[in-house]
């Protein structure tokens, strides 16, 4: 399917992901398991391709956010253990058992439901118990006055028929923020997590096989939190400050092409609302890349995109399917010239900062009408267009 490949496309460099995996592996050591977070279609990179690569590289676990995301991987031949981090309706329990998918247990109500469904199905559901140590989202609440009730709730879940508690985990809320108060918060969460584990293991007289908590920020900054397994997402894809510090490589490069060029006289309003008005004769290039492709409209008239002659300023409002750049002083940029939206030359981190967001949001936003082109050893190994055709 190549119909739109030269319009706007995302190049996914599998070598970069492999390189990042190897670097993170070196950092964590061979005794610590590696879980690759591939939720949200691997942050927009394509969960099947990324999971196949991780399986080949010897990663230990994958994590997704829903049963659909997990089943998509199984149906496409992924054999590694997969953990569902988020909510799964109890009706799906038989399928999780059938497909060998691990489910997070986030509270007593869920433990009860999943246990009952597993017993009814005559099988055993592998689970990881989630502990809320301060993220205040999912998990058994264990902080402040809730330590004893949290611990006894977890012990109860571990003993339920139909459930096999292979692991226990928590999630850090501030490990990727810099500041003493943030560091203290992470340390508190970790200290509480280990105390919960000790108390539960003592009451059960049984040790969890896999204890895990380290996301990207903790992998980069807090080696003491690695325990049995780490759980990076963003770091694997090579974005953000920590990836930069570790010399990792950005996996995705978004590209588009100049579709039309016009020269407008002074005083011409460009795009919806006339947010930009030319102050001299201005050469404007129209790019087939808009908010329906995943561009954030809040970047209108703000950022620059990268041409072969360097950064070109975005002019006027970003439309659904198009945006405009100023190429007045870039005579060699012509119809058909490639423009990098973000990637190796135009850092996604800078673009995210300009939009007041994080790189996660920009790669997740790349929409399904943008074809992904996969590279390995400098060659195209796969192409995917996610439209129904
Ligand atoms: C998304 C997610 C991660 C990965 O976070 P990064 O910041 O991308 O490393 C880890 N654990 C949980 C529970 C998550 O939801």
Image (tube, rainbow, N blue to C red):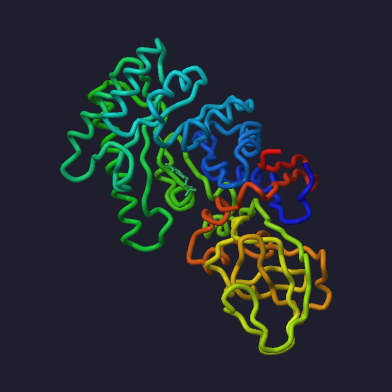
Horizontal and vertical percent for residue 311? Answer: 69, 73
Horizontal and vertical percent for residue 161? Answer: 31, 15
Horizontal and vertical percent for residue 50? Answer: 63, 39
Horizontal and vertical percent for residue 243? Answer: 56, 55
Judged left or right of residue 370, residue 191 is left
Q: Residue at 27% across / 21% down in the picture?
A: 205
Quadrant position of residue 213: top left
Quadrant position of residue 206: top left
Give the answer, above or below, for where 143 lies relative to 32: below
- Nearer-the-camera pick, 12 or 228: 12
Which residue is farthest front? 273
Q: Residue at 34% across / 24% down in the picture?
A: 207
Give the answer, above or below, for where 243 lies relative to 90: below
Which residue is farthest left? 145
Q: Residue at 54% across / 45% down in the picture?
A: 27
Q: Quadrant of the C terminus?
A: top right
Count the numbered circles shown.
Answer: 0
Q: Quadrant of the N terminus?
A: top right
Judged left or right of residue 313, residue 221 is left
- Nearer-the-camera pick, 181 or 360: 360
């Amino acid at each position: 399917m190549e119909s739109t490949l030269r319009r706007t496309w995302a190049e996914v460099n599998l070598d970069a992901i492999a390189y990042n995996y190897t670097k993170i592996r070196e950092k964590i050591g061979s005794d610590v398991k590696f879980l690759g977070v591939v939720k949200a279609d691997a942050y927009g990179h394509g969960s099947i391709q990324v999971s196949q690569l991780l399986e080949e590289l010897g990663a230990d676990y994958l994590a997704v956010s829903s049963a659909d995301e997990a089943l998509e991987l199984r149906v496409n031949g992924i054999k590694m253990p997969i953990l569902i981090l988020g909510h799964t309706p109890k009706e799906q329990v038989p399928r999780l058992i059938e497909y060998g998918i691990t489910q997070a247990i986030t509270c007593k109500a869920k433990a009860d439901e999943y246990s009952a469904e597993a017993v009814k199905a005559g099988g055993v559901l592998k689970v990881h118990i989630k502990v809320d140590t301060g993220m205040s989202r999912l998990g058994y609440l264990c902080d402040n006055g809730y330590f004893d009730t949290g611990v006894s709730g977890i012990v109860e879940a571990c003993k339920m028929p139909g459930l096999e508690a292979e692991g226990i985990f928590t999630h850090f809320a501030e490990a990727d923020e810099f500041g003493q108060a943030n560091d203290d918060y992470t340390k508190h969460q970790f200290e509480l997590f280990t105390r919960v584990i000790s108390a539960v293991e003592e009451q059960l007289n049984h040790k969890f096989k896999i204890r895990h908590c380290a996301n990207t920020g903790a992998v980069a900054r807090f080696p003491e939190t690695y325990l049995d397994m780490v759980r990076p997402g963003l770091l694997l894809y090579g974005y953000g400050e920590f990836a930069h510090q570790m010399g990792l490589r950005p996996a995705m490069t978004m590209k588009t092409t100049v579709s039309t060029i016009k020269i407008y006289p002074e005083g011409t309003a460009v795009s919806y609302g006339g947010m930009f008005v030319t102050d001299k004769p201005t050469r404007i290039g129209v790019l087939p890349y808009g908010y329906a492709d995943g561009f954030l409209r809040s970047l209108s008239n703000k950022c620059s995109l990268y041409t072969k002659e360097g950064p070109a300023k975005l002019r006027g409002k970003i439309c659904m399917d198009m945006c405009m750049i100023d190429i007045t002083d870039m005579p060699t940029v012509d119809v058909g010239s490639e423009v990098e939206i973000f990637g190796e030359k135009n850092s996604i981190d800078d673009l995210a900062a300009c939009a007041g967001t994080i790189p996660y949001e920009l790669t997740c936003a790349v929409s399904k009408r943008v074809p992904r082109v996969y590279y390995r050893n400098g060659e195209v190994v796969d192409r995917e267009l996610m439209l129904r055709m």
